[in-house]
Every structure is written in C-alpha cells, then in structure tokens.
Image (cartoon, grey):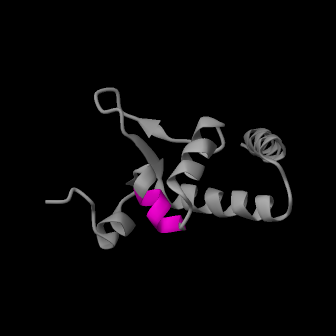
Amino acid sequence: MSRRRTMEAILASDYVSIGELARLTGCRYSTLKHYTEEGMLPFEQEEENLTRRYRREQSIQLVEWIRQQRKAGRSVPEIKELLAENQHTCSEQE
C-alpha cells in the first residue's frame, strides 16, 4: 500500500514534503532540492523525523516567483541576492 497522500489531503495540509511540493508546482524534485540546498526555499524539520516540511502556500508562491526570475534570465546567485534584500526589507518594516 502506498504512503502517498491524496491531492485532497495535500491541499488541506499546512505543510508538505518536497515530493508533494513537486506535485503541486510541477517543478522537478531535483530542482526543489537544489533551491533548498542553496537556502532559497525554507523548510522546517522535526528532530526525531528527518523529513523536511515546507509551508505549502508560502513555498508554492516562492517557487513560482523563483521560476519567474529564472525566465527573466536571472541566475541563482542573483535570485539569492534578491531574496536576501527582500528579507532585509521585510524585517525592517516589522
């Protein structure tokens, strides 16, 4: 029996796995893993369970934004810089 959750269960969840995020965005697993390793895609991880959990809505929006930046011709380092600037601006406003 498969452990794969139904799309209905995924859409009702606040958190998703990287595989589920790939299903939701149509983005390759390896691409999402690369974005995660580059620090572009934040996740949470429970101590006893090594599974990375991504905030569903936030992560979907972020993946779409990254895709737009890539289509505009920006490199991963350029996108990382934009993300860092965005986080700096957001934290100043709080």
Task: Please tell me whether residue 6 is drawn above or below residue 33 in the rendered image.
Answer: below
**Residue 32 in picture, x, y percent from top left:** 56, 50
**Which of the 4 image quadrants contains residue 81?**
top right
Main SS of the magenta part reads helix
Residue 31 as seen in the image, left or right of residue 45: right
The residue drawn where x is 56% and y is 56% is 58
- Which residue is farthest bottom? 8
The residue drawn where x is 50% and y is 53% is 29
The residue drawn where x is 47% and y is 58% is 21
Which quadrant holds the N terminus?
bottom left
**Which of the 4 image quadrants contains residue 10?**
bottom left
The number of discs equals 0
The residue drawn where x is 48% and y is 52% is 55
Q: Is residue 22 magenta?
A: yes
Residue 27 as seen in the image, left or right of residue 5: right
Residue 57 as seen in the image, left or right of residue 86: left
**Residue 8 in picture, x, y percent from top left:** 31, 73
Task: Please tell me whether residue 13 is drawn above or below residue 39 in the rendered image.
Answer: below
Residue 46 as seen in the image, left or right of residue 54: left
Q: Is residue 46 magenta?
A: no
In the image, which residues are magenta?
Answer: 20-25
Which quadrant holds the C terminus?
top right
Task: Please tell me whether residue 94 is drawn above or below residue 6 in the rendered image.
Answer: above
**Residue 38 in picture, x, y percent from top left:** 66, 37
